[in-house]
Structure formats: structure tokens, C-alpha cells
Amino acid sequence: MVHIEFTINGQKAALDIPADITALETIRSLIGLKGTKEGCGIGECGACTINVDGKAINSCLMLGARLDGTTVVTVEGLATKENLAPVQEKFMENHGVQCGFCTPGILMSAHALLAENPDPDHKEISRALSGNLCRCTGYSQIFVSVKEAAKLTDQLNQLKKVGG
Amino acid sequence: MTDIEYIRPLNLKEALSFLWEKGEDTKIIAGGTDVMVDLRSDGLDKKYLLDISRLEELKGIELNNKELSVGAGVTLSEIYSSKILKSNALALKKSAKNFASKQIRNIATIGGNVAHSSPCGDTVPALVVHDAKALVADKKGTRLVSMEEMATKAYMSCLSPRQILVKFILTPYQGGFTDFQKIGRRRELAVSRISMAVFVKKDKDGRISFLKIGLGACTPTPCKMESVEAFLTGKIPTENLIWEAGGILAGNMIKITGRRSSAIYKEPAVQGLFMRILYPVVKS
Ligand SMILES: Cc1cc2nc3c(=O)[nH]c(=O)nc-3n(C[C@H](O)[C@H](O)[C@H](O)COP(=O)(O)OP(=O)(O)OC[C@H]3O[C@@H](n4cnc5c(N)ncnc54)[C@H](O)[C@@H]3O)c2cc1C
Ligand code: FES
Ligand code: FES
């Protein structure tokens, strides 16, 4: 067993895990956050995408022990008590979600992208999401959702500046 | 089935001491993007997982005194965003562009790519072009290994279980023309079926004065293509000449691999890719 301590969605976690399990198993089975999905389990579908220290990664390819000392955000950590995150709101509004299986992963890729690049063009969105497969939407609604989320994030930031 | 132990050494010295004692029973894990896939499919017949992903000694990209060094623990994302590589090893930067996906580039390392010794490793052709040497360390010392010696056969590196790949030392190139291209079954997340990196310099008369070629995914282990480089050096690159050189390149590949069934596809494809990658040199 390995002892790990890290921050997940703003809360401290400390637990003992087997040395050979993935970050995905750690988060889903041991911590009990089931929002992050397992699709392929081998890095090809992106359903398991989480943000570790601000970067999108496939949790199925990360050793759980490596979470030690990191700051993790999963899909459960996007919304605040009052509001959905801009990506979540805009995916709903623009039909970026159909069956929803790919959605947590796509939201986390989009979230990391917008933190790094607040105004991505079509190509940049495509590159950031190329590791996320969606069998339902045909992607065009997803692109619209991400673009709209970028605009909303920008507006919210402007408001914050004015307010503060 | 978890009697595997996880070890995260604090520094390279500690890691090397551990491997000196227990290397045979240990699997090194860096980004884990190859190791985790193997772990899932076949399990792990080792006692220890040695996590080297946080070793400072394996990080960083530096240029000093005509020597460009890239740490084995540098991620593909770091390679893609490096300004030093953009101006001194553009082909390597380009090889990181369509590597797997953003999520994988964020943790996969160049050291893991080379140590895995897949013939399809995307960073390898660019490393060959830059005459890269790998600095390999064990508890007793270090040695330099060329890219051609690095893999003994497909998926088998020359590293002993006591060794760690520390960094790559590249010859930096400025100016000239350089590119990396790969052909896969699809654009994203595609395993390269053929990849190629080149660096070309022309003199003031338009003759090729310096040329380096790295061919990937076509031969079991990386090899130099010196006969093709020699054939083109000193000549003015015309369409016909590049086509002819592409033929020699494809011929060299067949000499190494033997005429397998995939040759029907690969032989003309290598020639075609060589033409495509060097076409800008013909026109300019
Ligand atoms: C979905 C998917 C897509 C992929 N696409 C591509 C692609 O487009 N192009 C491509 O080239 N590869 C691709 N790969 C393969 C893989 O991502 C790369 O080979 C990657 O660079 C491996 O690096 P890593 O740090 O994750 O290695 P790890 O998995 O940590 O290690 C790989 C091997 O190298 C050894 N090792 C690692 N670092 C060292 C070191 N410093 N010293 C000694 N031994 C070491 C390990 O013991 C292991 O045997 C893909 C993989 C997946 C799952
Ligand atoms: S479950 Fe991780 S990429 Fe598919
Ligand atoms: S909404 Fe069903 S897979 Fe994307």
C-alpha cells in the first residue's frame, strides 16, 4: 500500500492505496467520485480526463500513487454551490451533450484549455479535444459550446474586474 | 495481486542506488503512458515500480556551448512549447505536435519514448537528425549512447535494469530547412506507419551543403541514412533528383527489413513522403 495525500476539488484527501492501481480507480472506487468515466482504459477515448495541477491528463494512464502532493479537479469540482461552470452551462445550452458518457472528460479538457488559452480558435479547440472521443454529437455542438464558454468566461472576468 | 511496491526516490543518486540493488525486480515508470497500458494488459512481473517522474536531474532543456540538452523526463508538451527547441531543433518540436493527444503529451516523456524502443516512436527520427546521444547513468558512472545503438531490436532497448536515461545531447541547428512528418491511419492518436525528419542547408549556389535524414517506423531500430545524405550533398535539388534519392532511401529500408508484404505499400510511400517533405527545398 502507498500513502497519498492530495487536494481534490478543493478538499484534502489522505488515503492508502494499492501501488498498482490507476488514478481513475483511486478517484472512482476509493474516493467515490463517479463523475469521471472509464471508457477504453488505455488512453484512447478521453472519458477519464481530469485536471492535475491544471493540466488535462488521462486518469486511466496515471498511477494512483502519482496523485500524491497534487491538486486535482474532476468534473464534480467545476460547479460552485451557486453556479455551474461556464463550460457546463454552455454545453447544456448548445446541446454539447447527448448520451453524456464523454461529457465529463470533454468538460475537463475544455476547462484546462480555457485556463491556458481564454480565446481559442477552431484549430486550437480541435487540438485540445483530439484525445476525447464522442460517438453521439458529431462534435460541432461541442465546438460551439466551447467557444460560447470562452465568451462567457471572458464576460464573467470583466464583471469581476468591475465589481472588485 | 498487489505485492508490488511503489518507490519514489528523491534524487537521481537514490534512484540509481535502488536500481543497483534491485534493478532486476524493478520497472521504471516515467509518464507511464506505455507502462500503464502494459500493466493493464499483462500485469507486471516485477516487485517494484520506481517512479522517476519527479527527478529534477531528468528535467529541463538547455543550450550551452553548441550543446543542446533535453532531459529524459521532459514531457512532449514541454518539447512542443520550448522556445529553445523552436530555434535549435525544430524537427523535434514538430514531432511533438501530433503526438498522441493533449492528455498524453502532458505526461509522456521523451525518455520513455526512446527507452520503450518502439520502431514507431515519434521523437526518434528528429533525434537521429540531430545526432543525439543519450546520457545513460548507473551507480558507477555514465556513458553516451547513440540513437543507432539505443535499441537492440524492436521494443528492446540496450539499457540494463540498473541504468537510467538521464538526458539527450543534440547538435543544435539554426536556419536551414527542417521538418517532421508522419503518415498514420488517421490524424489524431495515430501510431505512425512512416515518419520522417530532415534538416537541409543549401549554399549560396543553391547546392545542398548539409543534409540529415531520420526515417521512423520503417526499420526495427533507428538507423542513419548516410548513403542518401551523401548522394544529395553537393547537388542542386531538382524534383527528379529528390525522387531518385527517395528511391535510394526506400531501397535502403528494404535492405534492412527484407521484402515483407508491407513493402508493396511502404516502398513507394517512403519515396513519396521523402518527395513531399523535401519539396519546399526544390521550389525555394
Ligand atoms: C493512446 C496512446 C497514443 C500514443 N501515441 C503515440 C504517438 O503518437 N507517438 C509515439 O511516439 N508514441 C505514442 N504513444 C506511446 C507513448 O505515449 C510514448 O512512447 C511515450 O513517450 C512514453 O513515455 P512515458 O514517459 O509515458 O513512458 P513510460 O510508460 O513511463 O515508460 C516507457 C518505457 O521506458 C522506460 N523508461 C522511461 N523513462 C526511462 C528513463 N529515463 N530511463 C530508463 N528507462 C525509462 C520504462 O521502464 C518503460 O519501459 C501512445 C500511447 C498511447 C497510450
Ligand atoms: S478511459 Fe482513459 S482514455 Fe479511455
Ligand atoms: S454525448 Fe455520447 S459519447 Fe459524446
Image (spheres, coloured by chain):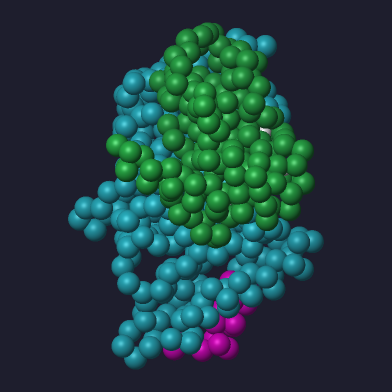
Chain colours: A green, B cyan
Q: Is residue B64 visible?
A: yes
- The reply to whether residue B150 is in sight is no
Q: Residue at x 53, y 36 (%)?
A: A85
**A43 to A21, vertically: above or below:** below
Name the outermost residue toward the right.
B261
Residue at 69% in and 73% down: B268
| x then y, percent, for residue B263 | 74, 65
| Residue located 32% across and 61% down the image | B88
Quadrant the C terminus of chain B occupies: bottom left
Q: Find residue A109 and report its horizontal and vertical position in percent.
A: 55, 41
Q: Is residue B146 above or below residue A89?
A: below
In which quadrant of the rendered image does the N terminus of chain B lie?
top right
Relative placement, left or right, of B191 versus A117 is right
Q: Is residue B217 left or right of residue A161?
A: right
Residue nearest the observer in this picture, B88 or A162: A162
Residue at image location 21% in from the left, 53% down from the top: B64
x and y percentages locating residue B262 in the rendered image: 76, 61
Q: Which residues are magenta?
A: B236-250
Q: Nearer the viewer, residue A45 or B257?
A: A45
**Magenta span contains residue B249:** yes
* Residue lying at the far front of the rendered structure: A163
The chief SS type of the magenta part is helix
Q: Residue furthest bottom?
A: B205
